[in-house]
Amino acid sequence: MPSEHTATTTKSGRKRLIIGACSVLAVGGLLTAAAFTDVANINLGAGSDGIIGGEDSTFALLVADADADGNPITPVDDSDWVSANTAAGITYNLAGAELLVPGDSVSVDIPVKNDSVNFDALLGASIVNMDPTGDSTLIDALRFTVTFTDEDGVQSTVISDAALAAATAALGTATLSPGADGEFGVTVSLPSTAGNEMQGKTAEIRAVIDAQSQAV
């Protein structure tokens, strides 16, 4: 009988050791979960506002509106500047174009404005055919000259007596400062060497002025 009593005591002692070890592990887990924490949230943006972009980051090229006869309004008041960035664009009257004969030229001035606060406007220009599937007899004979006058009144020729395929001036050919206005002049000529085959022919052209912002 004494031997059985000794075996029972030994078995109970083992259980107590195991429970004790589990208790130590549990206490250690509670200490880890109670650690102190913190976080830093940093808003990134211009100045102290924490904002990227805004009204000072806008960029637009405006042109003078046209009157009831299609003539560009000059001088241009603040309310007369409009966007022509649509598929329809804006139509200017090219006075005398309906009676163009060999040796004649017709022209129109296009006032433009860099309507931005913080960006220069890099400008380019081109003449495009609005009826590419039509009779090209007349438009192939026409010659185009485009000038640009900057905000200081300095004029330069950006396209000189060019046929349609070459009537292009790359972006950066002209520049306008923020808020400044200038003027493109477009001249369309029919050379004196054009023959009678031009009679009754028509052409539809568009002046395209491209603009790209550049940080000042």
Image (cartoon, rainbow, N blue to C red):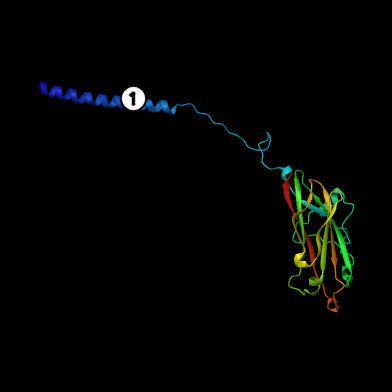
Out of 113 and 197, give the one closest to the viewer. 197
Mark 1 Cα within 10 Å, few/some/many (few <14, many 20+)? few
- Which residue has dot 1 on it? 24
Residue extending furthest toward the bottom: 196
Residue 35 lies, in percent from the top left, at: 46, 26
**Which quarter of the image is occupied by the C terminus?**
top right
Measuring 82% from the left and 69% from the top, which residue is drawn there? 142
Residue 133 lies, in percent from the top left, at: 73, 72
Residue 50 lies, in percent from the top left, at: 65, 36
Residue 90 lies, in percent from the top left, at: 81, 60
Q: The residue under label 1 is which amino acid type?
A: Val
Q: Which of the 4 image quarters holds residue 67?
A: bottom right
Q: Is residue 56 above or below residue 48?
A: below
Q: Is residue 65 above or below residue 194?
A: above
Q: Which of the 4 image quarters holds residue 208?
A: bottom right
Measuring 89% from the left and 69% from the top, which residue is drawn there? 104
Q: Which of the 4 image quarters holds residue 19?
A: top left
**Which quarter of the image is occupied by the N terminus?**
top left
Question: Is residue 35 toward the left or the right of residue 149 in the image?
Answer: left
Q: Is residue 185 above or below residue 204?
A: above
Out of 126 and 83, give the one closest to the viewer. 126
